């Protein structure tokens, strides 16, 4: 049975959630379904959807209860007549609720990507037919917020196997020595992603290692060189071909303080770049500690620095984790994510 699915995502930047919407819509089309994605005007998601030949509609979504935006989405519902509406972030969730007033027959599915306890009875009440949680950590947070476990489906995020045609040689680009230990941080350069902790981590590294480590920051808007806790760092800004930029790293630093799952970590493992991360959110479900990466207690920058030192100083451990990464990453495939989402839809529609 072919399904018509109206997806709503309000993100204005290219982050993990927007990547998942693109992959899901593309996977659904390949399965013979008809996805239509509502996205913010001039957003990276909208441009990528259209470049991929996927149906997309631009709607400006200024706030959670933006009446004009809800009316635009409602008009799309009336003319396009989807079988299901799927909201992918908090603002899209609120706008979909507004657009569906009086349309009780049309089910709403909401994907939750953050491991925070939700607030607000109205948004998380029975009008949402199913919640999709991207990890057990997210599911647990929903349940602590009052959502019954029977209304939640666990569907892990999925990423395609990275294909790298032109790997970047950061040592050559930056004139760094061959013996440099090349580490990287990938994603949004925000406080919750742990960027403010980088200097503290650097300060706790052994002095000899601190002089050998170089740190690439792949994401955000800032560019240029700087020093973080005695470690020479380079901000590359937003990198479109991020896999080619990641593949040359020796170690991924992932000091996030809250993470629903962490698709950058999946990419790193697939590219044989062992991650070091705080054991927060869904990361312990993703990284097999001591096998495909190293986990340390949440917020413990000394333990984080110690784990980096351990990987940098133990070649056998590093090689073993490199070898284990792709197999572990393959468990979080796009096909699995698309199939799990469809199963959630079928439960609703049945």
Image (spheres, rainbow, N blue to C red):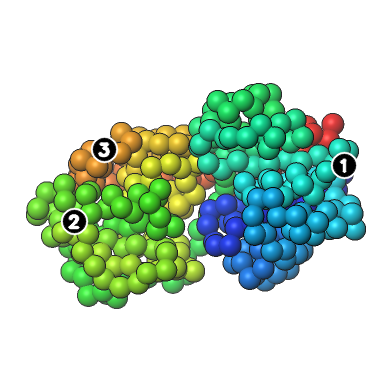
Rounded to the nearest whole Å, what is the CA distance between mark 2 and mark 1?
Answer: 56 Å
Q: Earlier in the sequence, mark 2 or mark 3?
A: 2
In primary-sequence order, the first of circles 3 and 1 is: 1
Tell me, for residue 102, which label it has, or none.
1
The residue lying at 73 percent from left, 40 percent from top is 109
First in sequence: mark 2 vs mark 1: 1
C-alpha gap between disc 3 and disc 1: 50 Å
In x, y percent, where is residue 225?
Answer: 26, 71
Residue that numbered label 3 is attached to: 300
The answer to whether marks 2 and 1 mark residues whose Cβ atoms lie closer than 8 Å is no
317 up-or-down from 152: above or below: below
- Location of residue 280 (image quadrant): top left
Res. 327 mark: none
* Residue 229, numbered label: 2
Quarter-wise, where is residue 69 in the image? bottom right
Q: Is residue 340 visible?
A: no
Alpha carbons under labels 2 and 3: distance apart: 16 Å
300 to the left or right of 179: right
Residue visible at 45% across and 52% down in the picture? 264
Image coords of residue 156 (percent x, y):
57, 40
Q: State the image coordinates of residue 86 (x, y, percent, origin top left).
A: 73, 46
Question: Crowding at label 1, few (<14), some or many (≥20) Cα neighbours within 10 Å?
Answer: few
Specify whether 67 is left or right of 288: right
**In the depicted view, which residue is nearer to us: 123 or 223?**
123
Q: Quadrant of the N terminus?
A: top right
Which element is circle 1 on?
loop
Label 2 close to label 3 by CB (< 8 Å)? no
């Amino acid at each position: 049975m072919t399904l018509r699915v109206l997806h709503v995502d309000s993100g204005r930047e290219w982050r993990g959630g927007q990547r998942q919407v693109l992959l899901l819509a593309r996977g659904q089309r390949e399965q013979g379904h008809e996805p239509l994605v509502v996205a913010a005007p001039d957003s990276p998601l909208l441009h990528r959807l259209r470049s991929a030949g996927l149906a997309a509609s631009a709607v400006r979504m200024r706030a959670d209860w933006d009446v004009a935006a809800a009316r635009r989405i409602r008009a799309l519902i009336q003319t396009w007549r989807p079988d299901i509406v799927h909201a992918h972030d908090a603002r899209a969730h609120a706008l979909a609720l507004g657009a569906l007033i009086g349309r009780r027959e049309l089910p709403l599915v909401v994907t939750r990507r953050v491991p925070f306890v939700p607030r607000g009875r109205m948004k998380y009440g029975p009008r949402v037919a199913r919640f999709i949680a991207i990890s057990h950590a997210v599911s647990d947070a929903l349940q602590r917020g009052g959502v019954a476990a029977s209304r939640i489906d666990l569907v892990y995020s999925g990423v395609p196997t990275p294909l790298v045609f032109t790997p970047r040689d950061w040592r050559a680009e930056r004139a760094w020595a061959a013996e440099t230990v090349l580490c990287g941080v990938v994603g949004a350069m925000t406080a919750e992603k742990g960027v403010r902790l980088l200097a503290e981590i650097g300060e706790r590294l052994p002095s000899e290692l601190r002089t050998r480590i170089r740190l690439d920051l792949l994401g955000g808007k800032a560019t240029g060189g700087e020093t973080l806790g005695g470690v020479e760092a380079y901000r590359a800004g937003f990198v479109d071909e991020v896999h080619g930029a990641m593949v040359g790293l020796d170690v991924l630093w992932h000091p996030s303080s809250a993470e629903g799952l962490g698709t950058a970590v999946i990419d790193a493992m697939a590219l044989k770049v062992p991650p070091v991360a705080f054991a927060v959110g869904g990361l312990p479900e993703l990284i097999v500690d001591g096998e495909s990466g190293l986990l340390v207690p949440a917020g413990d920058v000394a333990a984080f620095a110690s784990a980096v030192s351990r990987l940098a100083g133990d070649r056998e451990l590093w090689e073993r984790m490199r070898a284990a990464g792709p197999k572990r990453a393959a468990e979080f495939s796009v096909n699995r994510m698309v199939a799990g989402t469809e199963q959630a839809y079928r439960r609703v529609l049945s």
